[in-house]
Amino acid sequence: MTNWKRMQPSSILILFLSKIKEFIVPLFLSLFAGGYGSGYTVWLFPLLLLTLFGYCVLYWIFFQFSLEEQELRIKKGIFIKKNRYIQSRQVQSVAVHTTVIHRLFHTVKVKLETAGGGLEAEAELTAVSPEAAKMIQAHFGSKEDMNFSDISQSGETKLWNSHCNEENLVYTVPWNHIIAAGATSGKIGIVFSAAAALFSQMDQFIPAEVYEDSYGALVSMGAFVLTALFLGLAAVTWLISIAVTFIQYGNFEIKKADNELTITRGLLERRQLTLKLDRITSVRYITNPVRQGFGLWSIYVDSAGGGLQEEQLSTILLPLGNKHQLQKLTNQLLPNMIYPEEVRPLPGRAARRYIFRTSIFWWLLLVPAVWLLPIGWVFIGVPALFTWLGWQRYKDGGIYFTTQHLVLQNRGVNLYCNVIPHSCLQSTAVQQSYFQRRRNLCSISATVLTTSGGRHFQLKDLESRAENNILRWLRSPFHS
């Protein structure tokens, strides 16, 4: 691959489909204008499609890449020419994706991430041969022999499958854990939002008579039928959210080889991400109220490169597991970032501040609701719920130190246990407001390097003497 090469011709189709997705609103408007217009307006839609396709063809023609001496070189640009040189030492992660279209043409997509590279990949090869992808991975540190076309895997595999030795391990997450992750993920809200957004775009094409007839039919059904209809709709949405998670995280497998982790997952779109262990900057153990009741957690890792938008620019290491499984996984993959048995709780005088911050708005909103609405008093459950949430935030907050890492545990709605290695801290700050000073409290914040530039962690209302403990810990030489 020392000579300049182009991507596979199938990249034209893949780029064209991605551009259609980006320009879906202009395309929809041009199609609507052409259908109801006359003269030149009827050509808007085909002209826009032709322009997008022509751009994709020219992009493919002018995009070239080569591998030379541990360096990836890229030349691209239709009107403005760009040359990019990416050295092996700069690359933090290599991700390989195979969608259904990629598998039809026997190609893969390769993305290279660098530290602080922002939301976009440093380099993206839309469609290359699997052989070219293996050569790129070999140049940038991956030792694994990847099979990008194999997407079948038995659902009966045990959770922890070990091969070779402790330096070369394979972990496979079974199907029932993926289904449980989808059932408790909270994606039902996302599905409802997507359906509402789609309906809001389509309702203008539905005649008013249909609304009137539907409303009359719903009213005539009665409360029992309406309740059953709503529950049925909720069940369908819940099943859709499970299916989305199943497609996204099916065939989830983690491989450790030497100093690298390779995470492979996905049914329709097969994703493969290679991370170097020494580039991982934090580990986050996350659970929501439903999962917490069953003692189930997910593991996310932050790294200086890598991460997905749908995962808050992090990488999911384990979709779902209990504490025993979490500890077993991290003990063999990330022994310095094990989930702590306990954390030092917040002082009792901090409880009032947590409850006040969480619920005061809703208690104030209750006053006009009771005064103005006939049955406004029924809304008292809302501020009561947020009062309980404030208490939970206080009770679950805590801090923990070891010689090698800092643990900050806090709650929004979900509970987060953030494990931060001493050597990965970019900055640490201790803050104290006037009201905190009166109660001998303070807040701590810490920042680590991630793909987007940095991830910020914070814990409020610790003991004020925690500042001295933090300073001593930061100056401690007993870390690696």
Image (tube, rainbow, N blue to C red):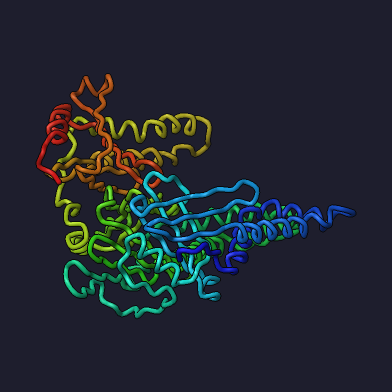
Q: Residue furthest left?
A: 478
**Residue 242 in sight in this render:** no
Rendered view: 31 above or below 424: below
Q: Left or right: where does residue 288 sit relative to residue 258?
A: right
Q: Is residue 212 above or below residue 257?
A: above
Question: x%, y% of residue 220?
Answer: 64, 61
Locate the N terminus and report the quarter of the image it occupies.
bottom left
Taking the spot 21% from the left edge, 57% from the top edge, the residue there is 334
Say above or below: 468 vs 194.
above
Q: Nearer the viewer, residue 393 or 254?
A: 254
| Left or right, residue 79 beside residue 290 | right
x and y percent of residue 48 in the render? 74, 55
Give the residue displayed 28% in from the left and 55% down from the top: 292
Quadrant in the rendering for residue 264: bottom left
| Count of numbered circles on the image | 0
Compared with 439, 477 (above or below) is below
For the residue pair 383 and 104, the one nearer the viewer reads as: 104
Q: Quadrant of residue 11?
A: bottom right
Q: Nearer the viewer, residue 441 or 34?
A: 34
Q: Residue furthest toward the right?
A: 39
Asked whether, in this view, residue 117 is left or right of residue 426, the answer is right
Q: Position of residue 75 (x, y in %)?
A: 54, 54
Give the percent coordinates (x, y) of residue 171.
26, 70
Choose top left, top right, bottom left or bottom right for residue 408.
top left
